[in-house]
Amino acid sequence: MASIRPFQSIRPAKELASAIPALPYDVYSSKEARDIVKQNSLSFLQIDRAETQFAPDTDMYSQPVYEKARDTLNEMIENGYFVKDKSPCYYIYALTQNGHTQTGLVGCASIDDYLEGRIKKHEHTREDKELDRIRHIDTISAQTGPIFLAYHMNASLNQILNAVKDTAPLYDFTSKDHVRHQVWQIKSIESINKITYIFEEIDNIYIADGHHRAASAVKTGLKRRTEHPDYDGSEEFNYFLSVLFPAEELHIYDYNRVVSDLNGYTFDKFLDMIRSGFEITDMGNEVCRPSCKGEIGLYGNGRWYLLKANPFLFSDDPVDSLDVSVLQNVILGPLLGIRHPKTDTRIQFMGGVRGLKALSEAVDSAGKGVAFAMYPTSMEELLRVADAGRLMPPKSTWFEPKLRSGLFIHQFER
C-alpha cells in the first residue's frame, strides 16, 4: 500500500501565481536560466538555479550558490511573495495543453515506499545530477520541484477530485508556453482522510518523470535520518513533494536522437548495413513521422527515410520490445558505436515537442550524421517495464506538459 499524505505548502501569493513558477531546473542551460531571471526577477529559477545571481564564471556547484538559493527563498517568504498554509492540505493541479487536461493530486510520498519498491522506477539516474539536487534540497531544507508520479485510475478518488474542481480554483493562469495551470486546495478533513485511505489501498505508484529529483529527495531524507537518530518516521524529511496523475490521462511524446557521424561509414553503406533488419522507404523531402510502433523516421544525406522494423527484432521482453531498444541494440550500438548513450558525446536527444524539423536542421547544420524520429513509448510499455523491475534505455520518454517548480514547496525544517 502507498503512503501519501497532505502537507503545509509554501506557495506563491495569489497575485504572483503566474510570475513565480518556472519549468524544471534541468530544462535550461545556465545561459537560458540567466536570461529568464534577467527578464523576470521573480522567476523561481533564481532559487532553483541560484548561479543566475552570480557572475557567469561562478562554479554553479559551489556551496555559496546553494546558500544563496536558501537565502533567496527565505527572503521571498518574509517579503510576502510566498505564503504558507496553516494546516496540512492536499491540492489539485490540472494542466491543459492543446485541449488535453491531466489532473493531478499534490501531496507528499514516502521515501520508504521508494526504498521498498512500492514507488516504481523505469530509468537509471546519474550520481553527478543527484549530488547537485541533494545539496540544493539539503541546504534549503525544502523540495521545490515536484516528482511526477502515476497511478492506475481510481473511481472513488476521481469523484472527490471532480467535486472540488466544481469550486473556484485557487490559481488559474496560462504560462508563456500556452499551458493552462489550475490549482484547487483541499482543506476538508473528511476529504483529506478519504484520499489518504484510498492511496493506502493502491499497491503501486510509478515515477513518470523526475527520477533524479526523487532519488535526491530520498537520499536527503536518509541523510536527515542519520542526523536525527531518534526519528519516528512522521517527520517531514521522510516524505517528498509529488503530483500524482492517473496513468490513463498522461501523454508521452517521442524522444528523438541525433548522431553526429556515421562511425566511418558512407551514408549509402550505412543504409545497406541496416536493410537486413528494416524495410526502407525513401521519402525524399517529406518529413517522416512514425505512425505506429515499429516505425522509425531516418534523416540523413538531405533526405528522409521510413524504417519499418522486421518482426524478428522484437520479443516478449518488456525492455527489448521497446522501439528505442531496437534502435539502440540494432543500429546505435553495433553500427554507430554508441554503446553508452548516456555519456557518449556523439549523440544528442531531442524531445518531440521541438518538432521533427529540429532534427533535419541539426544534421544539416553539422553537414554530417543522421537523425532518428521515434514513435512515442506508451504508458502501457512504461508500466510494464516498471512492474517487471526493469529499466528503460536513457531518454525513452518525454512528458508534456511539464510541472512547474515553485508552485508548491515542501519545507521539512526551518
Image: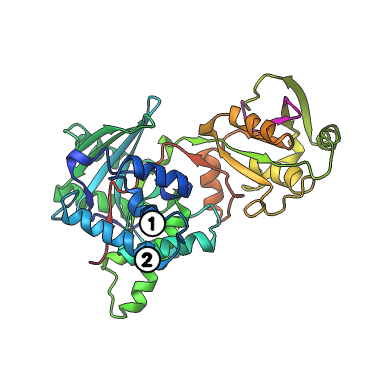
Q: Nearer the viewer, residue 155 or 367?
A: 367
* Residues rendered magenta in the picture: 291-305
Left or right of residue 193, residue 93 in this image: right
Q: How many numbered marks have been drawn onto this rendered protein structure?
A: 2
How many residues crowd mark 1 within 10 Å: few (<14), some (14–19), many (20+)?
A: some
28 w.r.t. 166: above or below: below
How many residues crowd mark 2 within 10 Å: few (<14), some (14–19), many (20+)?
A: some
Residue located at (40% from left, 65% from top):
135
Residue located at (27% from left, 74% from top):
232
Q: Nearer the viewer, residue 165 or 268?
A: 268
Q: Which residue is mark 2?
A: 64
The disc, 2 or 1, on the residue closer to the chain's N-terminal end is: 1
Residue 219 picture quarter: bottom left
Magenta-highlighted stretch: main secondary structure? Answer: strand
Residue located at (21% from left, 57% from top):
75
Q: Are marks 2 and 1 in contact (CB under 8 Å)?
A: yes
Residue located at (37% from left, 66% from top):
64
Q: Is residue 170 magenta?
A: no
Coordinates of residue 379 in the picture (x, y in percent):
50, 40
Coordinates of residue 337 in the picture (x, y in percent):
76, 50
Instruction: Name the mark nearer the viewer: 2 or 1.
Output: 1
Q: Which residue is mark 1?
A: 54
Coordinates of residue 161 in the picture (x, y in percent):
25, 39
Q: Secondary structure at mark 2?
A: helix
Of the residues shown, which amino acid type is indicated by label 1? Phe
Indicate the quadrant containing the N terminus: top left, top right, bottom left or bottom right: bottom left
Q: Secondary structure at mark 1?
A: loop
